[in-house]
Amino acid sequence: MRILANLLVGLVALSHVGFLVLEMFFWDHPVGRRIFGMTPEVSAASAKLAANQGLYNGFLAAGLVWALWTDRRELKIFFLGCVIVAGIFGGLTAKTSILFTQGLPAAVALVTVMAASRR
């Protein structure tokens, strides 16, 4: 169970590295515009905000990697909780799919981390 929990935490971290790359480097690019359904004007006007958002996703990924590296349960719980809150907020304020692409995987990982640490 512990291996599964760590794999899920790793997948959440990897997804946030992916979000970082998309938001920081491909937002104002045909790939980013297609993924996020934007016009060139919208992507150009919001590129700096997206880069900032991408940086925050990078911090979440770094925290999850740190938690895995040190194998500290409390860090896993904290950073997965941060991802869940961000997913809920994004789902309510930006796009509902964020709840499922960001919040749900983190929630599954959190439940697995909690179950793996029960003795």
Image (cartoon, rainbow, N blue to C red):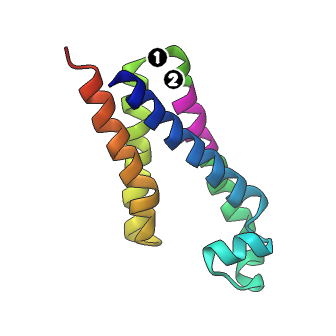
Q: CA distance from mark 2 to mark 1?
A: 5 Å
Q: Which residue is mark 2?
A: 68
* C-beta proximity under 8 Å, tags 2 and 1: yes
User: At which x and y percent is residue 77?
Assistant: 36, 31
Looking at the rendered structure, the number of numbered marks drawn on it comes to 2
User: Relative to 101, does residue 7 appear above or below in the rendering?
Assistant: above
What span is colored magenta in the figure?
58-65
Q: Secondary structure at mark 1?
A: loop
Q: Which residue is mark 1?
A: 71
Question: Horizontal placement of 34 versus 29: left or right?
Answer: left
User: At which x and y percent is residue 8?
Assistant: 44, 37
Question: Horizontal placement of 118 versus 64: left or right?
Answer: left
Q: Secondary structure at mark 2?
A: helix
Picture residue at 56% right of the left edge, 24% below the top: 66
Quarter containing the N terminus? top left
User: In front: 51, or 39?
Assistant: 39
Question: Horizontal placement of 102 versus 34: left or right?
Answer: left
Give the overall secondary structure of the magenta segment: helix
User: Relative to 119, does residue 60 appear above or below in the rendering?
Assistant: below
User: At which x and y percent is residue 68?
Assistant: 51, 23
Picture residue at 52% right of the left edge, 41% below the top: 11
User: At which x and y percent is residue 39?
Assistant: 71, 85
Picture residue at 38% right of the left edge, 48% below the top: 84
Q: Residues within 10 Å of mark 2 (few under 14, many from 20)?
A: some
Location of residue 59 by image quarter: top right
Mark 1: which amino acid? Asp
